[in-house]
């Protein structure tokens, strides 16, 4: 597995975000927990200018597709949401400690991989055997994107380019880019073609391509 790098955030570009509970334990126990979490996420995303494009809440982890207006939009929104949510759960259960596992994973996405990532996260309940069809799962954006509900308070349909039927058809199978999405999210490197990679490098002034293993040469 490639090494995880310092977080890469590109303003006004889609990113995949995921985070699990400590030791992959549950972070949600009932619908009240999920509603509280989403409401807090709404508050913090508006406060820190993070556009939520898609989401999926599972019992022990979360997935989001987001677009940050500023470089700190993601870290502030997710960090504050998880801090407040953890405090609520700990107070309710009379415990102390972390609820979420380490820092969250994220990676920038080009347009093609944004679509693949959206399919990937909305198909989580299908892969887990919870639902046969992604749009039947209550706690994801699939129900909005397939027209099962008219609106979702967390996200909108601005710049959404798929009809309900088109998106249903896409959700019936796994995206071809599933494995590269998983690797990019774990390492933090951009997920896209070489042109997108180079643009991310230009914006961040960083070398984001995978480095070959081995000792660095000593300077002469």
Image (spheres, helix red, strand yellow):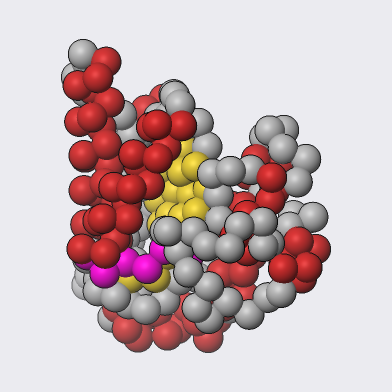
Depth check: give the residue in front, 218 or 214. 214
Residue 178 shows up from this direction = no
Instruction: Give residue 62's position: percent from left, percent from top.
Output: 46, 43
Q: Is residue 15 above or below residue 82?
A: below
* Quarter where residue 145 is shown: bottom right
Side of 184 relative to 96 (left or right)? right
Residue under the image location 49 percent in, 59 percent down: 152
Side of 189 relative to 146 (left or right)? left
Residue under the image location 21 percent in, 39 percent down: 84
Instruction: Give residue 71's position: percent from left, percent from top.
Output: 25, 71
Q: Quadrant of the C terminus?
A: bottom left
Q: Residue furthest top?
A: 94
Side of 69 relative to 213 (left or right)? left
Give the magenta-colored segment's residue range: 48-54
Residue under the image location 26 percent in, 55 percent down: 43
Residue under the image location 48 percent in, 49 percent down: 63
The secondary structure that most of the magenta stretch takes on is strand
Q: Residue furthest front?
A: 150
Depth check: give the residue in front, 212 or 57. 57
Depth check: give the residue in front, 133 or 153. 153
């Amino acid at each position: 597995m490639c090494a995880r790098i310092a977080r890469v955030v590109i303003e006004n570009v889609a990113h995949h975000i995921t985070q699990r509970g400590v030791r992959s334990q549950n972070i949600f126990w009932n619908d009240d927990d999920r509603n509280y979490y989403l409401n807090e996420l709404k508050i913090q995303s508006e406060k820190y200018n993070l556009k939520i494009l898609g989401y999926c809440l599972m019992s022990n982890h979360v997935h989001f597709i987001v677009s940050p207006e500023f470089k700190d939009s993601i870290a502030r929104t997710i960090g504050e949401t998880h801090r407040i949510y953890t405090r609520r759960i700990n107070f309710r259960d009379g415990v102390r400690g972390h609820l979420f596992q380490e820092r969250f994973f994220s990676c920038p996405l080009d347009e093609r991989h944004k679509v693949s990532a959206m399919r990937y996260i909305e198909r989580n309940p299908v892969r887990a055997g919870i639902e046969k069809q992604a749009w039947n799962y209550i706690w994801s954006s699939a129900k909005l994107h397939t027209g099962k509900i008219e609106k979702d308070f967390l996200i909108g349909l601005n710049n959404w380019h798929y009809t309900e039927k088109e998106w249903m058809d896409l959700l019936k199978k796994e995206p071809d880019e599933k494995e590269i999405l998983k690797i990019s999210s774990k390492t933090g490197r951009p997920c896209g073609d070489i042109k997108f990679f180079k643009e991310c490098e230009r914006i961040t002034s960083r070398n984001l391509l995978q480095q070959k293993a081995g000792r660095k040469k000593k300077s002469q």
